[in-house]
Image (cartoon, helix red, strand yellow):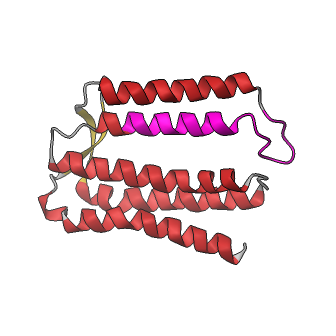
Amino acid sequence: MKKNSLQELGWALGVMLLPVLYAIWVYQTLPENLAIHLDLSGKGNAFLPKFLVVSAFPIVMMLLEVMIYWITIAKDILNRTFKHLIRWIIPFSFVSLYLATIYRGLNESFDVRKIATMLVALVFIIVGNYLPKKVQADRNSMNRKWAHLFVLLGFLTFIVSIFYL
C-alpha cells in the first residue's frame, strides 16, 4: 500500500469516528433500545441495545471500509476519481445513517426515511455517472442507456424524498 492510500484510509476511519464521539456524548439520554430498521411508515420494527449501536455498529462499518480499501488496491481501478468515490461512499453513508439513527433515538419524530432515500438517490446518480466509463482494466464499459436510467432514477428518487416524504 502506498503512503497516500494509508493516509486516505486513516482520514476515512477518522471521519467515521466523529459521530461515535457524539453518540458517546449523548449516551445517557439515548433510550435503552434504538431502532435499527424502520418500516415504510417510519416506525421502528427492529431494535438493538444502545451499547451495541454505539460500539459494535461502528466497528463493523470500519471493517467494511478496510475491506473496500483492500479490494480497491488488489483490483486496479483506472479512474482515480471513481476509486476515491468508492472509498468514500461507505464513510459518508455511515456518518449520515449513524447520525440519523442517533437523532431518531433522541427524537421519535425525526424522519430517517428522507435521509435514507436521499442517500440512495445519490448512489444512483454516482453509479449512473460512472457506468459508461471504463473503470477497470479487464472490463468493458457499460451501455450509456443504463447510465441514463440510473441518473434519471437518482434524480426522481431525490425529488420524491424532498417533496413526498
Q: Which residue is most to the right?
A: 138
| Residue 135 forms part of the magenta stretch | yes
Quarter where residue 29 is shown:
bottom left
Quarter where residue 23 is shown:
bottom left
Quadrant showing the N terminus: bottom right
The image position of residue 125, as x and y in percent, is 56, 35
| Residue 48 forms part of the magenta stretch | no
Q: Nearer the viewer, residue 58 or 115?
A: 115
The image position of residue 138, as x and y in percent, is 87, 44
Quarter where residue 56 is shown:
bottom left
Up-down: is 32 above or below 38? below
The image position of residue 33, as x and y in percent, is 20, 49
The image position of residue 36, as x and y in percent, is 31, 43
Q: Which residues are magenta?
A: 116-141
Q: Nearer the viewer, residue 26 or 136?
A: 136
Quadrant showing the C terminus: top left
The residue lying at 53 percent from left, 39 percent from top is 123
How many callouts does the rendering have? 0
Q: Nearer the viewer, residue 80 or 113?
A: 80
The residue lying at 49 percent from left, 28 percent from top is 155
The residue lying at 33 percent from left, 30 percent from top is 162
The residue lying at 39 percent from left, 67 percent from top is 17
Q: Is residue 12 left or right of residue 52?
A: right
Q: Which residue is most to the bottom?
A: 3
Q: Which residue is most to the left?
A: 29
Q: Is residue 110 left or right of residue 55?
A: left
